[in-house]
Amino acid sequence: MDRRDFLRSLALTGAAAVAACRDPPRALPPGDLLGPSFASAHRLPAQGFPPPSETRRVALAIVGGGVGGLAAGWRLARAGFADFLIVELEDTPGGNSRAGRNEISAYPWGAHYLPLPTSEAGAVRELLAELGVLHGDPHAVQPTYDENYLCATPQERLYRHGRWQEGLLPIAADAHERAEYQRFAELIDGYRHRRDRRGRRAFALPMEKSSRDADLIALDRLSMRDWLHSQGFVSPQLHWYVNHACCDDYGTGSAAVSAWAGIHYFACRDGQASNASSDIVLTAPQGNAWLVDGMLRSIGQRVGERLLTGALAFRVAGGETPGKEPLIVDLWLASEQRTLRLLAGQVIWAAPVFLLAHVLAGRAALRAAARRYTYAPWLVANLSLARFPDDRLGAARSWDNVLYAGQGLGYVDATHQRMRVAPGRTVLTYYRSFAELTPEEGRLLLREASREFWAEQILSELELPHANLRQVVTRLDVYRHGHAMCRPLPGLIWGGERARFAADGARLRFAHADVSGFSLFEEAHYRGVLAAERSFRSLGVASASLLD
């Protein structure tokens, strides 16, 4: 099937067919179609950039201003080291934790919550303490968290069979299904409490601190769906629930996600707090952008401006042999139409790993390992509402709202934390993965489909629980993530390719969540802090580790 036929088939089975049945078609709210810098990034395979017009020297270059790169900069700044530069392709840093804002509220363009960090995520707890969200000792068994960031209840609900229910696990149809639910919960609880001979948890967050027991590692060799079947789970509702979880965190369904990654989703999240249960998450109207803003403030307060945006790293060379010759990082500055060359003593690569196949000079084994990664596309839309739409019967409106039969993953309410008795204007952030398509098909659809296509599809879906939605929507903006997150397919997490990026390098290190094999804030933050601390000896920095 060629591109035109593929898009036509999607249109015939999707929102366009629904829209065609309406007479007359209803007007759509205004909005923008947004996304990362496609034009610059798509130049990488062909290269063809001009020679550098300027050369700068820096002790440490950090390529990528997402959470991993900012975490590395935050850790360096915290240790009092100033001679580094973070370079970022986009105009604003933050990666998948960027946000927008309008006259109603701030809202996320990606990640929108942080689970209560476990004791293994010590660096994340240190950051939260610095930001004033964690009170007291960040290493306490049960820290206290700022009530303004603890997600207000009700936290989750599910729309199914014409009404809302509390929680996301569908209500069991009968006693047999309830028994399956109970057995699944008991299995997960067993993994949650399991420790190996070294005291490591079976599934830790960050994943680097997880057990290496052989039976656990073996879970990475089959899919989550196959693991469910191997355990005798046949409930369609349970399979839907697990598939939703995999799509939500990994952009990929349970049929393709590694069983290790699928179980990790459920078994790793048991952070504790003195003033909240372990299933409560930390959130804000702008999603995880408040964490990005906090790291940026810390970097700026200590070392001044250390961020260059609008810079595409298209070549990283050198540093393969012993010696003190600098590594070369060539940057394309699109707004200035010129190339800037950095000569760096050390480099931390904190951009997605797959780009290394096009950027890295030499190092054939690393470039081959980078090609092993595949990425899930993702769509986020923000709907500005004059007031909250009429609701169906059942559970009260919640922060996270999921449709059982929806094409998307549901929506979160940006103003939920305000706890208003009479809901007024708000912004709903809608998420969609494309697990039903191949990643290439999903990216093609994102690239070719119009904002109007997406607006009609989203509104048609959300009209199921909110019949008057179109009457209250004042704006609908769409953001496309072509390579939103790496896909933890079987064999990636505990395979040799990923291990190459997790290993310490002499002068080139890696600090993206991809190094862990899946995209979570805690993983990106850990990798950034670890890369910075591994660089301390060469940089002459004396500082106790935050990761012990």
Image (cartoon, grey):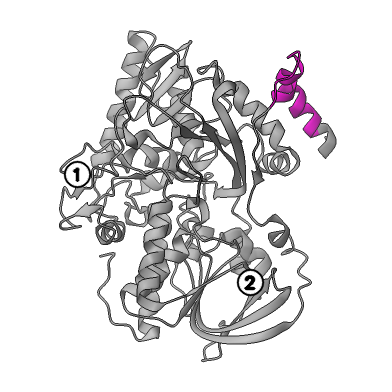
| Secondary-structure class at tag 1 | loop
| Magenta-colored span | 6-27
Question: Where residue 517 sits: x, y (%)?
Answer: 48, 52
Residue 168 visible in image: no
Q: Which residue does the image show at 38% across and 17% down from the upper left?
A: 165
Q: Per the image, is 161 magenta? A: no
Please tell me which of labels 1 and 2 falls first in the chain. 1
Against 119, residue 107 (above or below) is: above
Q: Nearer the viewer, residue 93 or 501?
A: 93
Amino acid at circle 1: Ala
Question: Where residue 51 sits: x, y (%)?
Answer: 74, 82
Q: Callout 2 environment at 10 Å: few (<14), some (14 to 19), or many (20+)?
A: some
Alpha carbon of mark 1 to alpha carbon of mark 2: how far? Answer: 43 Å
Residue 475 visible in image: yes
Q: Residue furthest top?
A: 174
Question: Where residue 160 sits: x, y (%)?
Answer: 46, 15
- The answer to whether the residues at label 1 and label 2 have Cβ atoms under 8 Å apart is no
Magenta stretch: dominant secondary structure: helix
Q: Which residue does the image show at 22% across and 47% down from the upper left?
A: 145
Q: Which residue is mark 2?
A: 360
Against 35, residue 87 (above or below) is: below
Question: Where residue 212 sits: x, y (%)?
Answer: 34, 53
Amino acid at circle 2: Leu
Against 5, residue 338 (above or below) is: below
Q: Quadrant of the C terminus?
A: bottom left
Q: Per the image, is 22 magenta? A: yes
Q: Which residue is mark 1?
A: 273
